[in-house]
Image: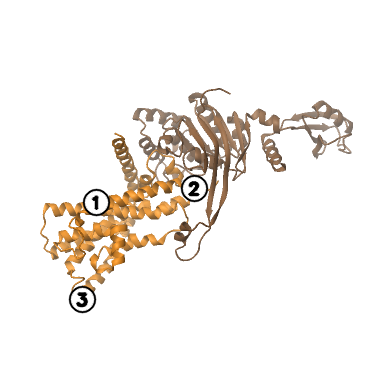
Chain colours: A orange, B brown
Amino acid sequence: MDSLRTLRTLGEELVICRRIAALRLRGQMEYRTSFLMQIGGTLLGQSTELAALVILFHRFGSLGGWNVGEVIFLHAVSQIIFSLADTISNGVQTIPVTIREGEFDRLMIRPVSTWLQAMVNDVSLRHLGMLIQGSILMGWALWAVPIDWTAGKVALLLVSIVSGVALFTVIFTIEAIVAFWTVNSIEAVNAFTYGGSDLAQYPFHIFGRGIRFIFLWIVPIGFVVYYPSLTILDKPDPLGLPGIAPLMAPLMAALFCAAVGLLWTIGVRHYRSTGS
Amino acid sequence: MPTSTPIIEADHLSKQFWVADRKEGRFAGLRSVASRAGHWKGGVSDISFSIQPGEVVGYIGPNGAGKSTTIKMLTGILVPTSGRATVAGITPWAHRKELARRIGVVFGQRTQLWWDLPLADSLELIQHMYRVPADRFATNLATARELLDLDPFMQTPVRQLSLGQRMRGDLAASLLHNPPILYLDEPTIGLDLVAKTRIREFLAELNRQEGVTILLTTHDLADIEHLCSRIIVIDDGRILSDGPLATLKERFGTERQLIVDYEDVPASTDLPDAGPAIRVVSQEGPRVRFAFDRHALSATQVLARADTLGTVRDMSIEEPAIEDVIRQLYERKKEK
């Protein structure tokens, strides 16, 4: 009963936050030119990275036994996940500023989750340039690699993307949580956000044992991009994990979310506001 | 004092802040989180009071005294280091969201509204946040629009509002869900006299009509004289005094002033057997201002002595202003 009520409350809070987000977006769309230029900028920036990849393959032919189409598939999945997460967690990423300026107070006096409020506090679609590029890449990969699509594979891809978006959003939250204790920003977290998304663009087995351990069992990025891709591309698992590994994305993401959620609650209790 | 259950109760509340030593260089953030180096800084210590439903209480003290810290604990923003509190039957920091439905909060220094949205949109969002039923929202909004005269700027983005308009908007927003308790932190700060008066009248009306309990911090003592039936004075994190304004004045405002206008400018202002209970505050031409301790001397006794300096044409007595009362209160504390 109790968990049912929690779920209903969460649903209601989500509806409220969607309203806030819609109003904020409406304001943003009034500056359409600036919006389009931001998206164009992101698109251009990302293209250079892709050019580097193409040159790399031109020189070496394959990467860890994966051909260019397969690696582009990884790139596409990783970018789609990261751009969606980056877009919805724009507000979460500004939490340290909110805390430093004492503005977090105003979230604390509302009967809605502070995290959700922060999320819709600053909505921005400018990171969607990456989503456009991710979709173009996906088109390219689907053209270059003959994938034997089944309903199961489509479902697996969608579930993994959703898990991935949740995972990255939560990684962005870690940096926000640290701000409850210190005004210094923790650049180290960037190794897991931007670093993690870069890493996910390459076949996971080319990395060393230490990196693999971290990105599988501590920050489970490997489970949301690499393992589902193995199954979708019908490739064997060179790391020899149990056969269930490609289906682990939702579970691993959920565990990670729960752990960070707990940290968030502790962090909020340490919030010290500013002034006297 | 009425004997009903208090609506706000602070019980030995203390809050100390841990200030970690700031680190420089590589991984500064990570190291300062991990490190234990730092020191405790006092916020408030051992704050206890209880407020009955319908009271309007002024919470005053100098900057850094701990006013905001106390309010933030009673709103659930800060978790105290020790002590207990109950607000509307709820421990604020343990059940922040439930408490939020029962309190209205206005911080004079920063708005609770959305900076880039028109006031009307902000109010609508708040309606949904607090799940205020549509009909009640309509009634409350109509009342607020009328009493706070919101109509001229309902469609203006909050960032373009004047300070006074913004404060009226904030007040309206804090009351949409009919909270029985209203916390106001410096509600009249930076406002001109007209705006201040308007806010004060609104608050007094709100308390009279709806019985809303109000706890307000302010530096403007006129706020207190117009609104508060009771004053809690805090300094250096501790409560110095708690009671009605009259008691406060009687206990600490012992110094009255006698203003005497002479026919001619008096040659000297040396009073016969003056003593410590009486002194000359100022002299401007034929007008001399004497201050005296109300417990040591009566006004007639002072006048009798003033009469020896020249022919008295007119005189008047001034009761202590609240500013002086507060100033004396702080001074007494320092002497201890």
Residue B193 appearing in the image: yes
Nearest the eye: B161 or B214: B214
Q: Mark 2 lies on which chain?
A: A
Left or right position of B258 against A107: right
Mark 1 belongs to which amino acid?
A: Pro
Q: How far apart are marks 3 and 1 (CA)?
A: 35 Å
Q: Nearer the viewer, mark 3 or mark 1?
A: 1
Q: Quadrant of residue B15?
A: top right
Q: Is residue A248 above or below residue B285?
A: below
Visible residue check, residue A42: no
Q: Which mark is residue A272?
A: 2
Q: Name the residue under label 1.
A: A250
Comes first in the chain, label 3 or label 1: 3
Name the kind of residue labelled 3 in the image: Phe
Secondary structure found at label 1: helix
Checking the image for residue A60, the label placed there is: 3
Distance from Cα at disc 2 to Cα at disc 3: 54 Å
Mark 2 nearby-residue class (10 Å; few <14, some 14–19, many ≥20): many
Within 10 Å of disc 3 (Cα), the crowding (few <14, some 14-19, many 20+) is few
Circle nearer the N terminus (1, 2): 1
